[in-house]
Image (cartoon, rainbow, N blue to C red):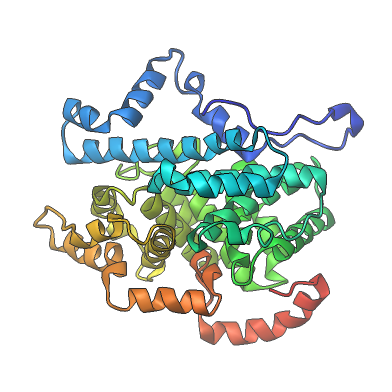
Amino acid sequence: MLTSVSQPRRDETENENRTYTPDFIEWLLSGLRVESFAPSRSVGTILDFACNSPDIAALMWPGSLTSAAWLELRNKLEAFRAFTSARRLTFGSTDTSEVWNCWAKSQNQHGDFLGLWKTEGLAYYLTLRERNRKPMVRGLISRHADQLPEGSLIPMHTGMGLAFASEELRQLSRREGGQEIRNCVVRYLHLCEKNSLDGYFSATFEALGLVVLLLRPGLLVAIDRQLADIDTDLQAALWHGVGRGLYFTPTNLLPCTSAAWPSLNRALRDPPHHLGRENAQAGLAWAVALVNVRNPVVMELFLKRHACRLPASDAFSKGVASAAVVWHLWSPNSNYLRNYCSHHPHSIDLELVASWERIARIHCRPEFLPWVEQLCLNHRIGDLFRVVAEAKDKVSIRNDQLANRRAYGVKK
């Protein structure tokens, strides 16, 4: 987990106007190294202990909130370690098809939960390698899609998007202007279009928000303005990625069951418009639900702490439902979603019970599976990575933006 994984640092003397922006995975790793937590390594030992023995940790520090916090921390660290461990799979072969084929044959050995994050990580590292060979690569997914189950396509696209976004941000200068940001956005758009399967474009594009939040948060508003000229669906995906990223920042390692959890505050505060706030909530919910899919108690205690602060809209519940779709497509025979449906809060708090039914068990309703089928049949998987503008507002927006989409060469 603690191995540096970015591409070699550029020689800063080559261009004094360029600044080195680290690979977002390297940046996360630097935040998760034990030295960054405390002067001593004792915290690192505790984290390893929590990751490997959460049940024992829960016994040592009893209480439902504490137990859920240890479980959540373990889930976060296991997901991240699985992602970064995928880099080893790229060693020993320069043939990307061969790597994916070997991964497909061994996928069952990695388990449902770890396999999801390893697939995303493998797509990330293989995309970085392909970009080094050919900057404007195309067809990355279509070449290998028939080698893996359909459920693997989502983490493949999100991993690819993370790599594209990370590389594009590395190329921005220290004093980036509006035109340079626009060029960066257009390049990223075209990379996503040329490498995403039909219906998966937003799954790739959404990663931009996550990476910008982690590497260059000061650019979020400027990029949002550029996307507003093209399509509000792109703005929605950007802020959905921001919400997902809020859950993974090292500064927000505090468990989501904490009363003073900063990620939700930022999701409700940082975006400059309603569409952004809706999507930041949905992205945050997406991450909380998917990372903790094995432990319904984490979502239960999140709702106990924060349900009263969620706006009246259904943005958060949409994020939970989208995460459930991702998991269902990835592992349709898993018991984890069924465990959510059978889980009931151990509380006499009627508001908590109502929130659980409305938000956490949304995928337990009869209409869930038909909705998943329609998403797949209509090639609308990208809808899982954004909450779109209201229809009454979107008609005029869409008419105003058609010309701009053509001017940018955007087809999706």
Question: Vertical placement of 248 versus 328: above or below?
Answer: above
Most extreme residue toward the top, as rendered? Answer: 40
Decide which of 350, 293 is in the foreground and name it: 293
Above or below, 72 relative to 196:
above
Q: Residue at x 46, y 14 (%)?
A: 39
Tell which of 252 and 111 is nearer to you. Answer: 111
Tell me which corner region of the image, top left, top right, bottom left or bottom right, holds residue 202: bottom right
Q: Quadrant of residue 336?
A: bottom left
Q: Quadrant of the C terminus?
A: bottom right
Residue 236 falls left or right of residue 225? left
Task: From the top left corner, tell me how far across and down residue 280 is, in percent.
Answer: 49, 59
Q: Left or right of 409: which side holds 192?
A: left
| Image point (44%, 41%), residue name | 79
Quarter of the image for residue 393 reads: bottom right
Answer whether residue 391 is visible to the viewer in this image.
Answer: yes
Vertical placement of residue 166 versus 369, above or below: above
In the image, 106 versus 279, the foreground residue is 106
Q: Is residue 206 visible?
A: no
Q: Position of residue 297 (x, y in %)?
A: 23, 49
Number of marks: 0
